[in-house]
Image (cartoon, rainbow, N blue to C red):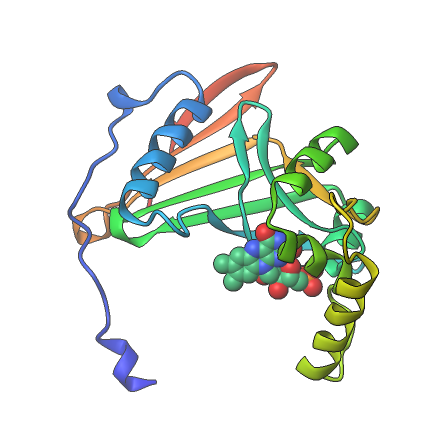
Amino acid sequence: MKQLHGVRKEYTSHELLRSSLPATPVELLNEWFEAARGVNPSEFNAMCLSTVDAEGRPDARMVLAKDVNSMGVSFFTNGDSQKGLQLKAQPFAALTFYWPELERQVRIRGGVAPLSSEENDAYFQSRPRASQMGAWASNQSRPTDGPDDLQAQFESIEKRFAGQEPIQRPPHWGGFRVALGEVEFWQGRPSRLHHRWRFRQVEGQWTVEGLQP
Ligand SMILES: Cc1cc2nc3c(=O)[nH]c(=O)nc-3n(C[C@H](O)[C@H](O)[C@H](O)COP(=O)(O)O)c2cc1C
């Protein structure tokens, strides 16, 4: 562990001043998203999704954001997975983005709602065929005896859908949208005096407050 004590970075690349904040968080979110795409085009949309289980204990994992707009941030998954069941029982989540190249973090908290069948179908049909079959083949979050079993499940799905085009969406597979209830932008700064601004909806209006780092 000792070798970790000296590992630290000085953040110097950007600042985030009150005067540069837009009226709504989605504008800055989109701006930061585009900047992140510029420096990491393949995985800038990876985010940590935090949920709580039936005992109120937190759980977290990475997922890919597939849409960002004023209604919230969407991602897709297996609705019968651990996260899917947790979100159905407790429809609130936190999202965390970290873009190290830009020294930026975004935290979002909000209520969660499932996407419509139309939205789910449209996205599912845009996926590569192998990913579509993977969605059928995996009972996500259930135990497995290992890669050979998974491969056998995949091959049986390949046989089942041989010659079929398009592949229908599995009924348990779809998206969730996390509403922009609260959005915090964090910009790393020298001497740990980071810039933090939190947007919150109060009676339908966005308010912003600065937070100590
Ligand atoms: C970079 C990255 C992106 C991921 N994207 C997704 C995703 O979009 N949807 C998903 O269901 N799992 C995704 N995963 C896998 C999840 O982290 C997780 O292992 C899986 O969804 C099972 O989580 P659960 O058991 O908590 O439901 C991703 C993993 C990584 C590392």
Whether residue 131 is visible to the viewer of this picture, yes or no, is yes
Furthest residue in direction front, as rendered: 163
Q: Is 149 above or below relative to 170?
A: below
Q: Is 10 above or below relative to 113?
A: below
- Along the horizontal axis of the image, is 188 left or right of 105? left
Q: Is 9 above or below relative to 96?
A: below
Name the residue rendered at 32%, 50% in the picture.
Answer: 40
Q: Quadrant of residue 120?
A: top right
Q: Nearer the viewer, residue 11 or 131?
A: 131
Query: How many numbered marks, from 0 up?
Result: 0
Name the residue rendered at 75%, 29% in the picture.
Answer: 118
- Along the horizontal axis of the image, is 14 left or right of 158? left
Residue 178: x percent and y percent?
Answer: 63, 37
Quarter of the picture holding the N terminus: bottom left
Q: Nearer the viewer, residue 37 or 31?
A: 37
Q: Is 26 above or below relative to 174?
A: above
Name the residue rendered at 55%, 40% in the picture.
Answer: 66
Residue 51: x percent and y percent?
Answer: 66, 52
Name the residue rendered at 21%, 46% in the picture.
Answer: 189
Residue 143: x percent and y percent?
Answer: 77, 76
Instruction: For ligand 1, give the image quadrant.
Output: bottom right
Q: Quadrant of residue 179?
A: top right
